Image: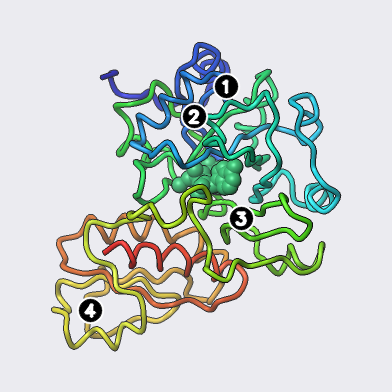
Amino acid sequence: MLSSAVIGTEIDIAADHLRAGRLVAIPTETVYGLAANAFDEYAVAAIFKAKNRPQFNPLIIHTDRIARLSGWGLQMPDLALALAARYSPGPLTYVLPASDRIPDIVTAGSGAVAVRIPDHPLTLALLSVLDFPLAAPSANPSGFVSPTTAQHVFDQLGQQIGYILDGGPCRVGLESTILSFLEDTPTLLRPGGLPLEAIEKLIGPVRIPPSGYSDNPVAPGMLARHYATRHPLLLGDPERFMGHCDPGRTAIISFCKTYPQVPLNQQFVLSANQNLEEAATRLFAAMREADAMEIDVILAEIFPDHGLGRAINDRLRRAAETQ
Ligand code: TXA
Ligand code: MG
C-alpha cells in the first residue's frame, strides 16, 4: 500500500505521475475522476484495483479537445459534432465506435468507447500537456457516492493514489450525461449534468431505453450497488415514512421544504429557492454528511423530474434500490 496521497494544484506533478503510469485524481465540473493513461493497460488496470470495480464496466476517456480524437482513430457522427460545438467542454459523454488505439480494458471489449471533454481549467491544462487521453471513472470505491471535493477523494481512496489535483468543489456535482451514438438515433445511457431538454433542443428526439438507464451496458443489471449509503435510504414523500421512523434518528434530503418532526441539523435542504442546479451541486455532499450521522435512516424526496431533477432522481433511485 502507498502512503497517503498528496493534495495539490501542480499540473506538472500530476503529469509526471500519469506519464509514469501512476494514478492521479482529477477535478472536473461534474465529479472528481480517478485518472490513468488510457493507452497504458497496466495503469488502467490499477484504476479497477483501486476502486474495486468489476472489469466488465468500461471507462470514459477524457481529453482537452474534440480535434484530437481523429488522431486516435475516433470519429464523431454529425449529431455528436453539433452537440460538441455547443457543449464541449461540458458535462456530456459521447459513446462512439472504438478504434485499435483504445485498449480492451478501457472499452470492456465492447467495441465502443466513451469520450468526454471535461470543463475544468486545471484538468484542461493538464490534458493539454499530455499526449494521451485519461481514462477516468468517478474517484470513489465502486458502488459508493461520487466525490465532489478533493477531501472526499482523500477520505475514500487516499491510500491508493499518489496525487490528488485539487480544483475545488465541483460546479455541477453530478456525473455527465451519457449519449450513445452507435445507432442513427442517439440513446440516453445515463441522465446527468447536461439536461435532456438542452440536448433534444439542439439535435431532436433522443431514444430513452424502455428498460430504464443501464449503468453497465455490457452486462446490464449486474451491478448490485450504486451510490450506496451506509444507512438505508428511502425515496418518496418523507411524510409517508415518518410514522415508521424515530424522528431523532432520521435524516432528510429535500428540495426546499423542512419537516418539523426532525431536528434541523439532520435536514439537508438542497435548494431553498428551488433551483435544480444548486440542488445537484449539493446532492452527493448531503448524502455523505447524512451518512456520517448517528441515525437509522435517510429519507429523500423525489425531485421534479425535469432538467437536472431527472439525474438527481436517477441517483437517489439507485441509492434506494441498493438497500
Ligand atoms: O462525469 C463523469 O462522467 C465522471 C467524470 C470523472 O468524468 N465520470 C464517471 O465515470 O462518472 P464512471 O466510470 O463512474 O461512469 C461512467 C459510466 C459507467 O456507467 C460506464 O458503464 C459507462 O459510463 N460507460 C463507459 N464506457 C462506456 C461505453 N464504451 N459504452 C457504454 N457505456 C460506457
Ligand atoms: Mg461512477
Task: Classify 154 as above or below 302.
Answer: above
Disc assigned to residue 85: none
Q: Earlier in the sequence, mark 4 or mark 2?
A: 2
Circle nearer the viewer, 3 or 4:
3
Q: Do the residues labelled 2 and 1 touch (CB within 8 Å)?
A: yes
Q: Is mark 3 on a helix, strand or loop?
A: strand
**Disc 1 secondary structure class:** helix
- Badge 1 is on which residue? 11
Residue at image location 56% in from the left, 18% down from the top? 15
Per the model, the C-alpha gap separating discs 3 and 4 is 34 Å
Ligand 1, seen in the image, is in the quarter at: top right
Q: Where is residue 242 in the image (x, y as percent from the top left)?
A: 22, 85
Q: Residue 262 carries which label?
A: 4
Three-letter code, disc 2: Leu
Q: Name the residue under label 2.
A: 165
Tell me: 27 left or right of 252. right
Q: Distance between the residues labelled 3 and 2?
A: 23 Å
Q: Position of residue 48 (x, y in %)?
A: 40, 32
Res. 29 visible in picture: no
Please tell me whether mark 2 sits on a helix, a strand or a loop. strand
Q: Residue at x 46, y 50 (%)?
A: 219
Instruction: Choose between 60 and 296: the one closer to the eye.
Output: 60
Distance CA(mark 2)–CA(mark 1): 8 Å
Q: Where does the C terminus fall, quadrant-wise?
A: bottom left
Q: Tell me whether the residue at label 3 lies in contact with that at label 2, contact meaning CB atoms closer than 8 angstroms.
A: no
Nearer-N-terminus badge (1/3): 1
Q: Looking at the picture, which amino acid does disc 3 mark?
A: Thr
Q: Which amino acid does label 1 sit on?
A: Ile
The residue to which callout 3 is attached is 177
Q: Quadrant of residue 113?
A: top right
Please tell me which of labels 1 and 4 falls first in the chain.
1
- Residue at position x 47%, y 20% from top? 43
